[in-house]
Amino acid sequence: MHAAFFDLDDTILDRSGSLRNFVEWQAKDALRLSAADSHNFVERFIALDQNGLVRKDKVYESLIEEFGISDWAVDELLNIYLLTFCAFCKPRKGALAALKGFQNSGYKIGLVSNGKTPFQERNFHALGFGDLFDCIIVSEAVGVRKPDKAIFELGCRAANVSLEKSYFIGDNPKADIEGAKKAGMKTIYVPVNSDVDRCEYADATFNDLSELPGYITHERFGSV
Ligand SMILES: [Mg+2]
């Protein structure tokens, strides 16, 4: 049996687009900022967030100060994010085609995501793909994060497949691609931007997820 494991943020979830929609709603409808302030709030949130690298309590702390917000506390804004972001989650273009492509070729499908539980589970299930997945691993729940080899091993154990017969598909060259390659998996690097450097640990690279089904029908491991 073979398996394909996917990262969540910016791999099957369009995190950037979903985040922008959420923050626009938070600024306009929850905080009731003016149109001009809402626009600036969104741009500052996205800059401070650094593609998810910065903790959201830190992001909100800065925004409250920058925008002189006095009637909302950091924890309140953070809770709105944690509970409501899932309502704005939308898949990355081509994600469903990629998942179906693997499934139709007889692969088990798994999710291995760095992040908080149950936040990431909510975001994942909001995409509506949950039924396609054989296993879901979120780092906080298992106490180990990508690129640690142990989290890839956990995924394979949960899906009852070997590392050597598994693909990892992700947008992060270090956490996803280098991590999975060093764990012994095949890797498909799917950066969101076409102008990023190639990743030396990637067996294949695609910007468009809908190209994956065509790739695996040519590159599949021996006979399934
Ligand atoms: Mg990612």
Image: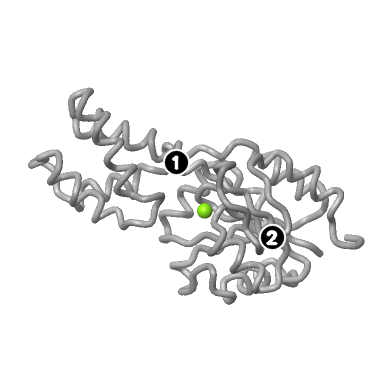
Q: Residue furthest right?
A: 223
Q: Residue at x 33, y 56 (%)?
A: 54
Judging depth in this view, the residue of 74 and 83 nearest the camera is: 74
Q: The disc labelled 1 sits on which kind of residue?
A: Ser
Q: Position of residue 6 (x, y in %)?
A: 62, 55
User: What is the residue that sits farthest to the bottom in this orientation?
Assistant: 150
| In the image, residue 27 above or below residue 173 | above
Q: Secondary structure at mark 2?
A: strand
What is the quadrant of the N terminus in the image? bottom right
Q: Quadrant of the C terminus?
A: bottom right
Give the answer, above or below, for where 127 lies relative to 161: above
Answer with left or right where residue 140 lies relative to residue 184.
left
Q: In the shown orientation, is residue 126 left or right of residue 5?
A: left
What mark, if any, has residue 16 been given in the picture?
A: 1
Residue at image location 54% in from the left, 52% down from the top: 8
- Give coordinates of residue 220: x percent, y percent: 84, 56
Residue type indicated by callout 2: Thr
Residue linked to disc 2 = 187
